[in-house]
Image (spheres, rainbow, N blue to C red):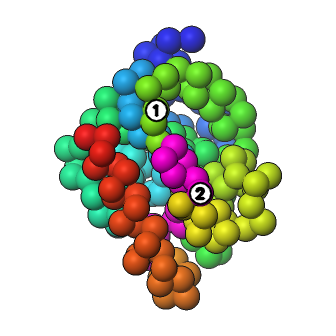
Amino acid sequence: MRLPVAMKEARACTLCEPDLPLGARPLLQGSSRSKVLIIGQAPGKKTHEAGIPWRDVSGDRLREWLGLSDEHFYDPALVALMPMGFCYPGSGRSGDKPPRPECAPAWHPRLLRAFRSVELTIYIGKYAFDRYLAHEFASMSEAVSAHEALLPDRMALAHPSPRNRPWMSKNPWFAAEALPALRQRVAGML
């Protein structure tokens, strides 16, 4: 399936709308020319309200980690954004609820086939790890620390949420080694 058709259909999805507190508003971007594919969790409330993926504090940190300006990050010819759940799932006791489970099985296979030019896929957070990397690594931290083995075409990242400051403090190699390697790889594709 051609990406424009798949994207148009995914953006119109209402599969799990009855279970969404703010209704369906699928947030994703990409084109058949996208070089980097970012598979994240699900939009937060601020991004849902803005209607722009990663338009929040976590997105600011992610763009910093990647070494990308807003202009480059939001250019679908460079970056495809495909979360595990396309819509804001609502909030729970300790943050946002998990991505809706219907989304990835319904849409990821179709969209992945259409992203023909992707050179680097970045898996962000537990839900992307569980779906795509858990068969290779015992934990998300192990997958993130394997950045040298995964690059040049894949990389796992902890979620850039401020809630992950304790993880970053316990893993100083992430900022010292993994992020510079990621920035270098991304810069090489621009």
- Residue at 54 percent across and 61 percent down: it is 147
Is residue 158 one of those drawn in magenta? yes
Q: Where 122 sits versus 111, above or below?
A: below
Q: Please state which of residues 20 and 71 is positioned toward the viewer in this rendering.
A: 71
Describe residue 63's horizontal placement relative to residue 89 as left or right: left
SS of the residue under disc 2: helix
Q: Looking at the rendered structure, which numbered label has been put on residue 132?
A: none
Q: Where 141 sits versus 9, above or below?
A: below
Residue holding disc 1: 118
CA distance separating discs 1 and 2: 18 Å
Can you see residue 85? yes
Q: Looking at the rendered structure, which numbered label has been put on residue 149?
A: 2
Magenta stretch, residue numbers: 149-162
Q: Quadrant of the C terminus?
A: top left
The image quarter in which residue 59 lies? bottom left
SS of the residue under disc 1: loop
